[in-house]
Amino acid sequence: MGKTDLIIVGGGAAGLMAGCAAGELGLRALVLERKHKPGRKLLMCGNSRCNLTTNIAEDRMLQMFGEPVGAFLEPAIRAFTPSMLQRWFAANGLKTVVKTGNKVYPHTDRAADVLNLFTDQLRDKNVSLACSSTIQALEKVKSGFRITTDNFEVESSYVLIATGGVSYPKTGSVGDGQEWAKRLGHSIATYRPGLVGFEVEPQVIKGRVGKIYDKVLVDILEDGTKVAETRGVYEIEKWGIGGTAITDASRVVARQGLKDCSLLIKFENGQIEEIRPLRPRSIKEAMVTVGGVALDEVDPRTMESKKCPGLYFAGEVLDIDGPTGGYNLQAAFSTARLAVAAIGRRCGKAGFPAWEPPPKKDRPFKHGSRHGSRK
């Protein structure tokens, strides 16, 4: 049976960043991914362009997350800010660009290049990645933890669960991480769909299917009182309404548990439309899961479990969620690095090394090439 410092459960955004961070610290680490390839959901982000974060100050970002998520994420976001994330990618060979709405993308506009960067970093820093590794048991033992998969057993001093939420289950996010957390003593906040469209009465969309309004303001009302607002795109679909202004509103409705809500949609031309949504679309279609491992059972300064010492969490497996625009990836990356930093300190490792940008004489990254390669 193998033994290592850290086992990272999940090969998505949080798990891949955690693996890279472990490599930077010189930890012996293993990333386990249940699918045959890592980063399946990462490849879908931003219409396969990968909206990595939003280029705003951390104070504003925390405000946009709202409570209780913003307060919980504050130590993580301040330790690894949106600007630091951009510098990290540049230092590892992939420049980023800021586009409309302060959204940050890889300059190649290819999510595949982001995934290639992560897997290249794991390889270069001697962090093992085992795909097709479905966990059958995760046990607390005297020496730390023992994980049993279909094909092998491995023990580690620490475990970091980074398995994501329950949205898009075909990508591997099926709630298994939450189940292991529950067996180790954690409470799981009820799952609700976040960042998803709404089904509406047929007359709302009649004759307008396919219409897209680029800039609207949406007031979210509960019993006629405004509780929040969103802005962005409004789209009329054959099944209901969507677009960024609507999906952001759905997250507010889920997070605040609104029951009798309506949406007051304000168009650029001054027109106003009020809609009472029937229901959100399925959680399987949601871009993010509201719900997960209860936040009051995790130390926000380290991401360590308060119920099971040595167990850590990162990303959407926790009850954290943010608006569209790279917030959820930023949360995944920041919580992953905070958790690994805490584990590193317990293993006697110094802090992360400084990131040095690549030499200026390097030729620019070419579209279609693998990250870090030069034609």
Image (cartoon, grey):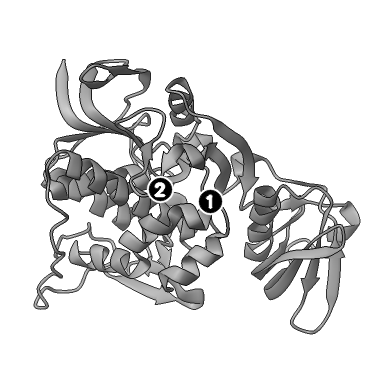
Between 46 and 333, the residue placed more toward the observer is: 333
Residue that badge 2 annotates: 300
Q: Quadrant of the N terminus?
A: top left
The residue lying at 78 percent from left, 61 percent from top is 209
Q: Amino acid at mark 1?
A: Asp
Q: Which numbered circle lies on residue 321?
A: 1
Left-right relation of 72 to 150: right
Q: Tell me which numbered mark, 1 or 2, is placed earlier along the sequence.
A: 2
Q: Residue 273's mark?
A: none
Q: Secondary structure at mark 1?
A: loop
Is 315 placed above or below 206 here? above
Q: Secondary structure at mark 2?
A: loop
Q: Residue at x 41, y 49 (%)?
A: 42
The image shows residue 69 at horizontal and vertical percentages of 52, 53
Question: At 25% from the left edge and 31% from the top edge, which residue is drawn?
Answer: 158
**In which quadrant of the rendered view does residue 113 lie?**
bottom left
Local crowd at mark 2 within 10 Å, few (<14), some, or many (≥20)? Answer: many
Q: Where does residue 374 sit, x and y in percent of width and height?
A: 14, 64
